Amino acid sequence: MSWLEVIVLGLIQGLTEFLPVSSSGHLRIASEVLFGSDPGAAFTAVTQIGTEAAVIVYFARDIWHLFRTWLRGFTDAAVRRTDDYRLAWMVVVGSIPIAVLGVLFKDRIETVARNLWLVAVMLIVFGILLGLAERFGTQHKPMEKITWRDGVVLGFAQAMALIPGVSRSGGTITAGLFLGINRPAIARYSFLLAIPSVFGAGLFTLPDVLAGDGPSGIQMIVAVVIAFVVGYAVIAWLLRFVQNNTVYVFVAYRIALGTALLAALSIGAISAT
């Protein structure tokens, strides 16, 4: 892998990880269009470590508070009745579906799921679903009122992102809006929910990335650092954006990109595999 490819893909990962547009889909499309190759699902998983590190730094105070509350809850009955204790457990429970499905379908995720025809369809379909969720979701529920049922549903929604083109944040935001959770709350919860699964996936697939003709260890470090810096800036921007704006701009972008990709595949301008 060339240094130009490492830098470009690191930038794309940082820019798209937290937006509901699918970072894995963008990495797959950009690598095919710009470099004529597929960096692989493992490369995507490892670069996500950089963006999730940005989440940990940005939400350090919240994460530390939830972690302490979770630990105290094992010995303090009063703590177990708090919203924060329940929320901490929901992050744990919500991470299980993507972990289990990621292991069970690892081979298909790294092969069949990366076909660009599928990526294009997922961009459009889940773009439409995101628009419907924005239109019909009541958006009355704050993060503290997320229920156990919501947590399980959001966990499976996040797991859909194993298919490039769906979007981890897009899946959770879409499901959250349909469940009546407000935009700032579901965006924030989406960040927290991703931490265990993304770090686990990155560490699990790291040996695959460094094997064979893939990027070197130094190149992966650079890609992760770039993703971290850019991702941190995107977190701050997105949290401000969703306070007063709808997600329709992302809906339009997803549908436009998916349509353009279908057109390019139809005329043979790029290869699907």
Image: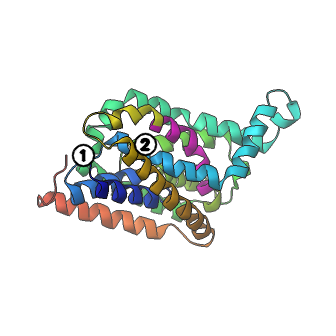
- First in sequence, mark 1 or 2: give its number: 2
Label drawn at residue 235: none
User: What residue occupies the far bottom of the structure in this picture?
Assistant: 244
* Residue 234 to residue 224: above or below: below
Q: Residue at x 47, y 49 (%)?
A: 168
| Residue 110, image x, y percentages | 31, 37
Residue 232, image quadrant: bottom right
| Residue 58, image x, y percentages | 64, 56
Label drawn at residue 46: 2
Q: Which residues are magenta?
A: 186-202
Residue 193 sits inside the magenta stretch: yes
| Residue 248, image x, y percentages | 47, 69
Q: Which residue is mark 1?
A: 115
Amino acid type shown at disc 1:
Asn
Q: Residue at x 27, y 52 (%)?
A: 2
Amino acid type shown at disc 2:
Val
